[in-house]
Image (cartoon, rainbow, N blue to C red):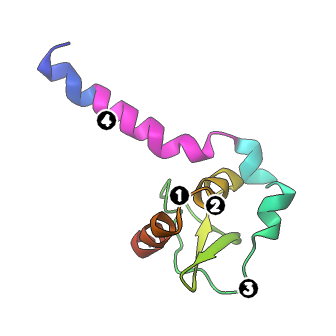
Amino acid sequence: MTAKHILPVALALAAAALLAGCNNQKAAEAPAADAKAQVAAAKPVNTACPFTGGPANPSLTASAGGKTVAFCCGGCLARFNKMSEADKLATIAKAK
């Protein structure tokens, strides 16, 4: 592979990894029962999903470090719930 092909391939792989949490449209429309159980009472600190950048659903939330973050779909919520506490805190710190 030549140097001029490396950047487009790297960008494509990065985009695929970013969207991996939301590859299931059904999950966005009807989150699993366990995702609904994760709904937190506090107002989320973000309006955009920290993984996809898409609009966050304020009814799909999780908390760490006393802060609540919202996600666009059940897939992203599940991804967050599998993270270490340190990674959760870093994700919340970057949330917008």
Q: Which residue is mark 3?
A: 41
Callout in the foreground (3, 2): 2
Q: Nearer the viewer, residue 19 or 79?
A: 79
Which of the labelled discs sits on residue 11, or is there none?
Answer: 4
Q: Amino acid at mark 2?
A: Asn
Write down the residue under mark 1: 54
- Spatial separation of the CA atoms under disc 4 and disc 1: 18 Å
Can you give x and y, in whole percent of width and height, for residue 18 in the image? Answer: 46, 45
Mark 1: which secondary structure? loop
Which element is circle 4 on? helix
- Binning the other alpha carbons within 10 Å of mark 2 as few (below 14), some (14 to 19) or many (20 upward) gives some
Say above or below: 32 vs 24: below
Task: Give the structural element (helix, strand or loop) at label 3.
Answer: loop
- Check disc 1: other Cα within 10 Å, few if <14, some if 14-19, many if 20+: some
| Residue 80 in magenta stretch | no
According to the picture, the residue beneath numbered tag 2 turns out to be 81
Q: CA distance from mark 3 to mark 2?
A: 17 Å
- In the depicted structure, whether residue 25 falls above or below residue 30: above
Tags 1 and 2 touching, CB below 8 Å: no
Pinpoint residue 73: horizontal percent, then vertical percent: 67, 56
Q: Is residue 21 magenta?
A: yes
Considering the numbered disc 2 on the image, is that residue within a helix, a strand or a loop?
helix
Tell me which segment is drawn in magenta. Answer: 9-24
